[in-house]
Image: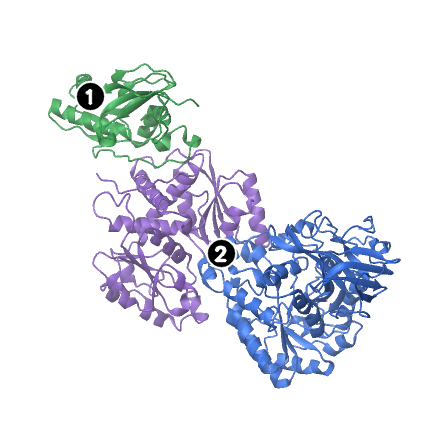
Chain colours: A blue, B purple, C green
């Protein structure tokens, strides 16, 4: 925090886990005034970072922008960050975050959620619409957008609901949300599927007027009544209601055909099955305007974990099989899946400290996403760091038409940057999360990588692994 | 034995035989002038029922009382607190009351597992049926009845498993905790299990279960030492699992004509309560081959055995390899 | 079977400090049982209403042998059964729950009869206390007597045997192990030393 010495080495071997000591649940600390530390509005020199995993390079930040990239840059008057061994990435962008405000501030607020995002290396997140009230009007999306601007940790781009109250019956005022200060481009009823084919068609068509995109939570509701977990060998044994892969795939198949028919942009949320990958691959091969995301947990975890009946593994769409996990990794590697999106879904302790059937669905993910991607994609040789920058920054920003994010790391570009120590290994301890919620499925798991610094328009939001 | 009985899969062959043999000894207590043993004096057994089941509850209650345990019946059904809160809060209450064992029936699959592993309580957990997951004491009493009936000689099969016996389970396998527990336990005891049901009432993934699957009851009956008929709820018809009750009964019900196709020694079992006219006709239900009533009687002995073996010592019983006694 | 006697010599336990010493051989055991049988006949005035109940495991075999001898003496069969006392023990909570042994009450029942409990070793007396409780739940005999092959002393309860094969004074560090052909392959009584704790 503000007491941090200005020139503390950007070393990774300190303190307390994936994300260190900081356990603040949202006091605005005044730490933003700490402009004497690295990342002031002035000059910051990042020395010796491996840009996109390449050879050591110096990056000079002046004000909100990247001024210069090269070797042995002069540091006169600049705060220096010794980034030897660290990976420099463009600031990460999440297309799928639940910030819970307004309405469920007991599980997360815009402030705590953006602090968690900054800790995870994010400089922009898309806040999903399933709040209370639902973000289905210009008023609500502007409120969320404004709270994000005030937090200062991370840009918040609201996602608007497709239908009023997520009810699936009447289109929300998509145009008004787009025209609002929030400038909404991505619309989603996430948490619920827009299952009515006509409503889905209309939504896809309607948002063409302002280059919007419908992000579909693909879940055929009748096939998933009382669903508790992936339908398969494990659900059969455990006697838990099955969520069959076909319930996701049937909607994706319909939606890509609809998108093709009306020439609209479709984004598929949290792809979870090998069959869904095949469908998206097919749609893309046709040249249709379809994009897709995968969550970190679907890249790592399988439904075998449900045998513990621990609701921390309860999520929607559910954890699938090993075969699905491998297909998703491959699809993310070959670009069939465009991006990683966290589906960060905070829940209060009591909503998970109960029996499986009564538990809420969802997992927090902002503070572990990059580590999981390193573990599943980089350390396995499936992606290099440049591709990680694409999947976690450039592509999601492009899908959301988000200005100023996901840009190349180049002189003149906004200084939205993330530094990661790839050599770090630590055991995940949710007690140290900045998120207000602790429902992480990685508790106790050793994962690689740690975000040491995050810069939002030239200003450090995270420094030496701690929030500024 | 493990400290809790949550799943029939928790039981090794030796554990299962220990329970069955113990139950066999305890059956004789019912024939004595004083049907009570002092063994669990001072122990508290809580029957925690989130779902109505008078039969199972009184069976556990009789078992605990015959062992002199103090019994507290806690029916949580209709409680106004949300389901999640009530299991944990109830568990903490029971812990404060010093429950040595909690017998739990719950509508959610996995609730007993959660209770056993959450750290909410310190006592033993006995699963008395959870959702569509498991009902291990039902499987034990079925195996108990099966072994007694199929055994030759006066020893009632003590020490013996069910090697080579062929058991057919018919009906709503998808929603049946009785079927799941029975498949685990019967397989552990060496029996060969075949399940018969319309494909809609078989779970996806059943091909990985240690049993044969058939859609044709008539073909399986002549090869069965026992046929276990599961209760089929009429509501399933409305969810399109089968077209009509009549069609279900015709294809998968057990009637006198079908019973005649079974070997002479073969049994008809039913966990109750029976839907006469649906999965079983009155003629079959009332025939001497039908063990439904015996199963209920065996239930008390089996549950006594489970409670004794879990609670009777400083820790649960340690099973040793058992062989058939020769006397 | 006396609790403490066997607790000190569990099967498969490491060998004792000193090698076990034989204190009774097969012929001694046979003679002792014959003597006890005669004493029973004498005290029970012909043993017409005697029911022998052995306490598992070895007490049951001893009861059967006694039954044979009584039949030889009196010319009529004597009912023999077994009485498992596990559920009545006072030390259940000191060890894992135990498997039950068989209780077999002869068809004639025990009401009004003379029950002779038969066990291999009498030690603390706690087993016999449990047996008396168990018997109480089964019926109401005219009288209950106790026959043991070995009385090793150290009673912890006001219990004594009516018929004793042999009194063997022991120290608490010693163990007494009865071997019977039916269970152990040979007859004998061994005196050993409990391994130092």
Q: Which tag is nearer the camera, tag 1 or tag 2? A: 1
How far from the left and from the top, in percent, is residue C147? 25, 21
Nearer-the-camera pick, A277 or B207: A277
Residue at image location 40% in from the left, 63% down from the top: B206
Q: At x 60% / y 63%, what residue is drawn?
A: A377
For label 1, the residue is: C33
Q: Quadrant of the N terminus of chain B?
A: top left
Above or below residue A192? Residue A429 is above
Residue topped by disc 2:
B109
Q: SS for tag 2?
A: loop
Q: Could you tell me which chain the residue with mark 1 belongs to?
A: C
Q: Position of residue C190 (x, y in %)?
A: 29, 21
Can residue B261 be seen by looking at this rendering? yes
View extreme (right): residue? A77
**Along the horizontal axis of the image, is B61 left or right of A136?**
left
Name the spot of residue A50 as percent of width and height, x first: 72, 61
């Amino acid at each position: 925090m503000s007491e941090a010495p200005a020139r503390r080495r950007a070393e990774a071997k300190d303190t307390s886990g994936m994300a260190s000591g900081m356990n603040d649940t949202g006091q605005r600390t005044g730490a933003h005034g700490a402009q004497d530390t690295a990342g002031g509005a002035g000059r910051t020199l990042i020395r010796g970072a491996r840009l996109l995993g390449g050879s050591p390079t110096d990056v000079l930040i002046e004000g909100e922008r990247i001024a210069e990239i090269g070797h042995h840059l002069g540091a006169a008057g600049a705060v220096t960050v010794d980034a030897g061994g660290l990976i420099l990435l463009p600031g990460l962008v999440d297309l799928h975050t639940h910030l819970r405000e307004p309405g469920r501030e007991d599980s997360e607020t815009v402030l705590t959620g953006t602090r968690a995002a900054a800790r995870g290396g994010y400089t922009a997140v898309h806040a999903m619409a399933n709040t209370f009230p639902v973000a289905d009007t210009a008023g609500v999306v502007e409120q969320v957008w404004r709270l994000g601007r005030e937090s200062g940790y991370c840009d918040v781009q609201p996602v608007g609901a497709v239908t009023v109250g997520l009810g699936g019956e009447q289109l929300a005022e998509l145009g008004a949300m787009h025209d609002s200060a929030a400038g909404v481009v991505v619309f989603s009823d996430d948490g619920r599927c827009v299952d009515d084919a006509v409503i889905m068609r209309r939504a896809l068509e309607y948002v063409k007027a302002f280059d919007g995109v419908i992000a579909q939570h693909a879940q055929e509701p009748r096939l998933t009544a009382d669903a508790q977990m992936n339908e398969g060998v494990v659900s059969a044994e455990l006697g838990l209601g099955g969520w069959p892969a076909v319930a996701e795939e049937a909607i994706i198949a319909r939606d890509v055909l609809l998108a093709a028919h009306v020439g609209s942009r479709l984004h598929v949320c949290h792809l979870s099955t090998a069959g869904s990958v095949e469908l998206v691959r097919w749609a893309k091969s046709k040249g249709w305007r379809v994009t897709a995301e995968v969550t970190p947990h679907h890249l790592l975890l399988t439904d075998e974990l449900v045998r513990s009946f621990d609701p921390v593994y309860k999520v929607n769409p559910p954890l699938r099989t090993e075969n699905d996990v491998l297909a998703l990794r491959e699809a993310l590697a070959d670009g069939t899946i465009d991006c990683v999106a966290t589906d960060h879904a905070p829940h209060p302790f009591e909503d998970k400290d109960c029996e499986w059937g009564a538990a809420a669905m969802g997992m927090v993910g902002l503070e572990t996403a990059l580590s999981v991607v390193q573990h599943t994609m980089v350390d396995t040789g499936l992606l290099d760091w440049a591709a990680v920058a694409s999947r976690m920054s450039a592509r999601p920003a492009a899908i959301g038409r988000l200005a100023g994010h996901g840009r190349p790391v180049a002189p003149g570009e906004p200084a939205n940057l993330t530094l990661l120590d790839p050599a770090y290994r630590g055991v995940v301890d949710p007690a140290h999360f900045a998120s207000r919620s602790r429902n992480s499925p990685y508790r106790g798991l050793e994962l690689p990588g740690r975000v040491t610094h995050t810069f939002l328009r030239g200003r450090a939001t995270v420094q030496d692994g701690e929030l500024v | 034995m493990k400290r809790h009985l949550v799943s029939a899969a928790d039981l090794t062959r030796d554990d299962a035989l220990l329970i069955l043999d113990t139950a066999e000894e305890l059956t004789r207590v019912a024939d004595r002038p004083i049907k009570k043993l002092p063994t669990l004096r001072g122990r508290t057994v809580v029957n925690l029922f989130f779902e109505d089941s008078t039969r199972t509850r009184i069976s556990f209650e009789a078992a605990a009382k015959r062992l002199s345990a103090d019994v507290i019946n806690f029916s949580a059904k209709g409680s106004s607190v949300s389901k999640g809160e009530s299991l944990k809060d109830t568990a903490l209450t029971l812990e404060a009351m010093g429950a040595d064992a909690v017998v739990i029936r719950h509508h959610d699959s996995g609730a007993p597992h959660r209770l056993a592993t959450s750290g909410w309580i310190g006592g033993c957990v006995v699963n008395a049926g959870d959702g569509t997951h498991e009902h291990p004491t039902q499987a034990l009493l079925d195996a108990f009845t099966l072994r007694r009936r199929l055994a030759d000689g006066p020893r009632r099969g003590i020490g013996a498993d069910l090697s080579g016996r062929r058991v057919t389970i018919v009906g709503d396998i998808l929603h049946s905790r009785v079927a799941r527990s029975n498949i685990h336990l019967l397989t552990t005891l060496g029996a060969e299990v075949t399940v018969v049901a319309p494909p809609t009432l078989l779970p996806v993934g059943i091909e990985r279960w240690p049993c044969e699957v058939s859609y044709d009851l008539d073909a399986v009956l002549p090869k069965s030492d026992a046929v276990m008929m599961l209760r089929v709820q009429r509501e399933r018809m409305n969810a399109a699992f089968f077209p009509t009750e009549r069609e279900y009964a015709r294809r998968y019900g057990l009637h006198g004509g079908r019973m005649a196709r079974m070997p002479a020694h073969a049994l008809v079992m039913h966990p109750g309560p029976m839907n006469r006219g649906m999965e079983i006709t009155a003629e079959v239900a009332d025939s001497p081959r039908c063990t439904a009533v015996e199963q209920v009687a065996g239930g008390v002995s089996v549950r006594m055995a489970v409670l004794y073996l879990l609670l009777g010592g400083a820790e649960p019983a340690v099973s040793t390899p058992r062989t058939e006694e020769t006397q | 079977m006396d609790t403490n006697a066997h607790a000190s010599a569990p099967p498969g336990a490491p060998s004792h400090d000193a090698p076990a010493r034989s204190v009774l051989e097969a012929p001694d055991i046979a003679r002792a049982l014959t003597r006890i049988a005669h004493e029973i006949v004498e005290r029970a005035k012909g043993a017409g209403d005697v029911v022998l109940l052995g306490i598992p495991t070895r007490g049951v075999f001893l009861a059967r042998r006694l039954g044979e001898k009584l039949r030889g003496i009196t010319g009529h069969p004597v009912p023999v059964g077994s009485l498992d006392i596990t559920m009545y023990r006072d030390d259940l909570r000191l060890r894992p729950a135990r498997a039950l042994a068989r209780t077999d009450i002869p068809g004639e029942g025990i009401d009004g009869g003379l029950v002779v409990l038969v066990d291999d070793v009498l030690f603390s007396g706690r087993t016999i206390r449990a047996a008396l409780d168990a018997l109480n739940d089964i019926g109401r005999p005219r009288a209950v007597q106790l026959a043991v092959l070995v009385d090793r002393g150290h009673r912890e309860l006001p219990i004594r045997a009516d018929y004793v094969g042999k009194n063997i004074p022991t120290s608490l560090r010693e163990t007494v192990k009865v071997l019977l052909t039916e269970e152990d392959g040979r007859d004998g009584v061994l005196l050993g030393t409990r391994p130092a704790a």
